[in-house]
Image (cartoon, rainbow, N blue to C red):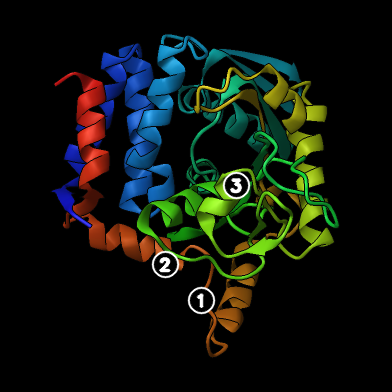
Amino acid sequence: MSTVALNLAQVHQLAERCLAANGCDAANAAALADTIGAAERDGCHAHGLFRVPGYVASLRSGKVDGKAAPRVEQLAPGVVRVDAGGGYAPLALQHGRQPLIDCARTQGIAALAMVNMHHFSALWIEVEAVARAGLAALACTAYMPAVAPAGASQPFFGTNPMAFGWPRGERAPLVFDQASAAMARGEVMIAAREGHSLPPGVGLDAQGAATTDPQAIIDGGVLLPFGGYKGASIALLVELLAAGLIGQAFSFEAKENDNGDGGPPRGGEFILAMDPSRFGDANWLAHAEGFFARLGGIAGVRLPGDRRYANRERNAAANIEVPRSLHDRIVELTGD
């Protein structure tokens, strides 16, 4: 596959320029480009430049307001709400993150309800920022039906990712981000683009038969929850937290209200932040570090996030290899 080598600054510039050319104001374009650049930097290509055509589609169709100005409200001592105004999640998160952190430090625990927004990025970026402020964080968001409930062959849940971050003092936080599906849909799409087969158990084809062909899943098939009913239960939990609790669309409602342009639907995100220093254990940091040391000392174990941090360190001074077809498509969408 032919590629184009870009450094991180060029990745950011390419994304920002394309988004600005298609209806984003400076604040929204920069926030989106920050998220896209972070994903490429850390080797999460399914949430990097790969997403730009989807962003552009939703801007051009008018579904998303590229000039949205988020509004922050304090609903309760421990609840912050950000109305994204029909815009994308990254700028809304920039507005809501510090109020959430301040609230959690005051109350010990606090929640951020993000509403009327379009989420198209990785969740680990969001919880890592909160964990670097010294707080534990849990985030989740629903999407559109793509995953069958356990025992079914029809989509009902979104891929419904959930991310968790734990602060580690001077060390980089422990962070994991995983879909409740056996594989994120973006990873399936990249596998189809590159002609790779999938592991067994990822999805079914349009006839409900098990398949390892990513294109068969995309073309009328369905993803499966990881671990059968256990993953389906987590998908259900995410629906209730990111939709039911904060008054946003469940995945099936998001699908019914979406215009089908290929971009992200409108929905919500739920983030919970907890200050470990307010839960009665002055030794919490050392205690947890002892746990990580014991876990990491087991042969074959890699702590969640370690590979992402290794990619970050390597890519800080290296180029990102972007598929030429994707690069050229983004340049075309920019109008250059």
- Point out residue 15 in the picture as x, y percentages from the top left corner: 27, 30
Q: Residue drawn 36% across and 57% down? A: 194
Residue farthest to the bottom, as pictured: 299
Q: Amino acid at mark 1?
A: Arg
* Earlier-in-chain disc, 1 versus 3: 3
Location of residue 335 by image quarter: top left
* Earlier-in-chain disc, 2 versus 3: 3
- Point out residue 243 in the picture as x, y percentages from the top left corner: 76, 29
Residue that label 1 marks = 302
* Earlier-in-chain disc, 1 versus 2: 1
Which of pointers 2 and 3 indicates the residue nearer the eye? 2
Could you tell me how far apart the alpha carbons at marks 1 and 3 are, in whole angstroms?
22 Å
Question: Badges 1 and 2: C-beta atoms under 8 Å apart?
Answer: yes
- What SS does tag 2 mark? helix
Residue that label 3 marks = 135
Label 3, residues with CA under 10 Å away: few <14, some 14-19, many ≥20 = many
Where, quadrant-wise, is the N terminus in this rendering? Answer: bottom left
Left/right placement of residue 149 relative to residue 333 reads: right
- What SS does tag 1 mark? loop
Answer yes or no: is residue 79 visible: yes
Q: Residue drawn 54% across and 60% down? A: 213
Where, quadrant-wise, is the C terminus in this rendering? Answer: top left
Could you tell me how far apart the alpha carbons at marks 1 and 2 are, in whole angstroms?
8 Å
